[in-house]
Amino acid sequence: MEVLILAAVALFVLSRLYLALGKGENNRPVGRTTPASGSEDNGNRARADELAMPSADRPVFTGPAAAGLEEIYNLDRSFTTSGFMQGARAAYQIIVSAFARGDKAALRPMLDDDVYEAWEQAIDARASGEAAFELLRIKKAEIESADLDGSVARVSVRYEAELGDGEMVRTAREIWTFMRDVTHSDPNWILDDVETAN
């Protein structure tokens, strides 16, 4: 009789152990999720949060030009700061080199009318055979500001570069503003303004 009582007690203890080991944190069964009390719509709320979160493909704009860059992106979803800056650095190299060579044909499609006229006069005024400053390296290039006027986007880039003429080296600090109608299929930006930077 005692053996039967002991066997019954052992069976009870083992069953309690099995139930305890089969549960996870907060006594919830492992592998199952249950809503917290009073929040039966948690699943719906989580799905709504996911929909409200920005897409992983959407760029994040920071800095003082962020608002303008965001406006440009909203009208032209192919716009990214990394892509723009890659083009802006290349444009600086091409334009400065073309100006140094006096290559008006290379400059014309890359410059706004006013900028082209000013640079054309500077090339013509340069004495024959006078050495021009060539680009040695771009030390810094960063977006200074951005805005959208209707469909016309303007992004200003602050450049710091080393220029040399074979005898001396000087540092150029300028702000170049590039312009583009973002509703047009032509992806190219043109140089709209050049200012000396502090």
Image (cartoon, grey):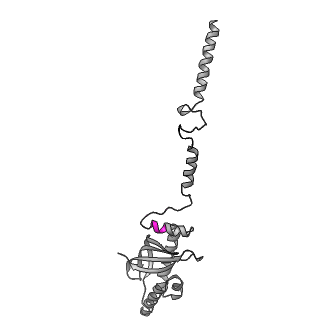
Which percent across, then down, holds residue 44?
A: 58, 47
Q: How many marks?
A: 0
Q: Is residue 100 visible?
A: no
**Above or below 167: residue 61:** above
52 w.r.t. 32: above or below = below
Quarter holding the N terminus?
A: top right
Q: Residue at x 57, y 44 (%)?
A: 41
The answer, for residue 50, to whether it is visible in the render is: yes
x and y percentages locating residue 157 in the rendered image: 44, 73
Q: Residue at x 48, y 88 (%)?
A: 102
Q: Quadrant of residue 32?
A: top right
Query: As rendered, which of 163 and 9 lies closer to the eye?
Result: 9
Write down the quadrant of residue 52 in the picture.
Answer: bottom right
Give the residues in magenta.
Answer: 60-69
Q: What is the residue that sits farthest to the top in this orientation?
A: 1
Residue 30 image point, x, y percent: 59, 34
Residue at coordinates 60% horizontally, 14% vertically from top-left? 9
The answer to which of 146 and 169 lies nearer the viewer is 146
Q: Position of residue 84 (x, y in %)?
A: 51, 71
Question: Is 135 contained in the magenta span?
Answer: no
Magenta stretch, overall SS? loop
Give the camera-side residue of 79 and 141.
79
Residue 171 placement: quadrant: bottom left
Q: Residue furthest left?
A: 198
The answer to which of 150 and 183 lies nearer the viewer is 150
Vertical order, 39 against 105 (above or below): above
Quadrant occupied by the C terminus: bottom left
